Amino acid sequence: MRLNITALWLALAASFAAAPALAQTTSPFTPPEEKLGIYVANSGPGLDTGCTYRGGGPLLIKIPVPKVVNDKQLNPDGTLADAAKLVSNGVLSAQATIRFPVYDIDDKAQNPGIAPELDRVSFNGKFKKTLEGFNNTWTDDSIIVPIEELKFGQDNELRIDIDTGNTTEEWCMAVDWVSIEFEATPPYVLAHGIWADRGTWDEGESPGVLAALEERGVLVDRWSLGVAQNGNGSVAANAAELNTHITDYLKPLKADKVHIIAHSKGGLDSQGLQALGPEFEIVSLSTLSTPHRGSVAADLSIIQKTTADDLVARGDDPGGLAAAYIDGWTFGQGPQLPGLRDLTTYAATAAISTGQRGNIPGTYTFGANADLNHDDLLTDNEMDPYPGISHRALERAWRVLRTFQEATMTLTTVPGHIWGTRTVLTYTTVLTPEPQANDIVVTENSANPGYGTPLGNSGANHNTVRSVGNVNTALDTTIPLK
């Protein structure tokens, strides 16, 4: 729109007071809904200014973009340290689209002594193009920029220098809103197992794992669950905690999807989370030795912790192995109630039958075998880095898992020998058809339950299954899932 004589006073006001000349603020183009990789500025400086002349410019529009990659991949100014690597890894798209509806662009006007409208567009300090459009008309304009020109965790700036071909107030324009749109892989969450906390994933406990995640560039977070129970929270309680943590984690990213990599019971907690019907989508769940079908060691531990006057054994127990496990004393170490109960084989059967497990389509599973040389013995080096003082108990657990499929129990009350009543605990052990490979805590069959996609069994124990190799395989599989 060209300034005419009757509107000269408006132009002068714009020149001296930077006020809009004409009210034209809303386009027919609806801004996209914000979500991961789509961020919108729909108010603030430079927007909804009305048709603005050069004296009211330049228009400087700030568009904040959150950190959707980890800090290790960012320069101090928020740009990517190695954009090509993140694009190659599938974490980010190679380009971003900047959309911005513009009003009244008279770039084709022909008036004697007046240059056509020439509005220069820059993004984060780099010139991109001059605007094209039509008189008194909104145009849905856009530019495409390399992903390395974006700033993450900081404001990005779209700048429009108005009517740069003239030195007087001749042409005006306006911008309704601005969006930045690119593809990004959903963020990751690390979930720990029972009798553990977020430190499970530290370098000392899981060597190289955090570094591998950082190297890929994905955003990742983790929390300690069931703190009041010393890491032994139930699936239901931990699932509720995860729901809160992940919701808060995703909110500033405008994200509604997440990937989870879980060790041991963390995989059960994650399926418990899915059963709650969270507002976000669990795109993938990668489980490292999760007892999806339970653990007979947990069955026997529940028997061990149940108070009764008499203990009656049923079923086969070669060498008194189950009895020795029950008679053993753990000194309060290892998994405890209430979470321990969720690890039993009968809890697993109930959870699977009611949809509490096997409910995430993108489930990927890893198992492990601690008998590295397959000699049917468990040596000290195969139990490292578990403390040496625990090796005898660990070896017993390993043999129990090899030998038994399940151990059920019943409690009955009978008359006392002289007076009163007595409580009788009867347990029944069921042998496996053949020795079960296991990692001291979870069998390969339970880790790969028949739902989900198995990604391989490694030579590792329940600790060392949290390996760089397994995590990289999980990332290779899940990063492309968006």
Image (spheres, grey):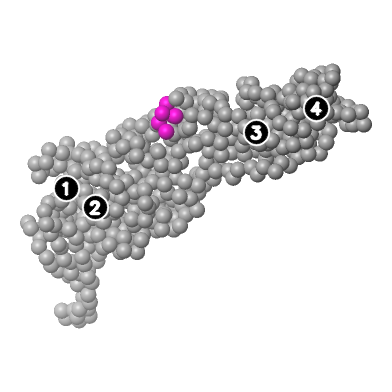
Q: Along the line of sight, which residue is nearer the eye, 464 or 113?
A: 113
Image position of 63 with respect to 268: above or below: above
Q: Is residue 286 visible?
A: yes
For disc 2, the marked residue is 446
Residue 401: give x, y in percent of width and height: 17, 52
Q: Which mark is residue 171?
A: 4
**Inter-mark Cα distance, 2 to 4:** 72 Å
Which quadrant of the rendered structure holds the N terminus? top right
The range drawn in magenta is 85-90
**Contact check, label 2 and label 4, Cβ < 8 Å:** no
- Distance, label 1 to label 2, CA atoms, is 10 Å
Q: Characterize the local packing of mark 4: few (<14), some (14-19) or many (20 or more) Cα atoms within 10 angstroms.
A: many
Q: Amino acid at mark 4?
A: Trp
Which residue does the image show at 64% across and 28% down from the upper left?
157
The kind of residue tagged 2 is Ser
* Residue 89, quarter of picture: top left
Which amino acid, mark 1? Ala
**Could you say which disc has been placed on residue 141 in the image?**
3
Please name the predominant secondary structure of the magenta segment in the image. helix
Q: Counting other residues with Cα less than 10 Å from the Cα at mark 2, is it few (<14), some (14-19), or many (20 or more)?
A: many
Asked if one can make out residue 174 in the rendered structure from this viewpoint, the answer is no
Which one is earlier in the sequence, the residue at label 4 or at label 1?
4
- First along the sequence among labels 4 and 3: 3
Residue type, numbered disc 3? Asp
Residue density around tag 1, few if under 14, some if 14–19, many if 20 or more, within 10 Å: many
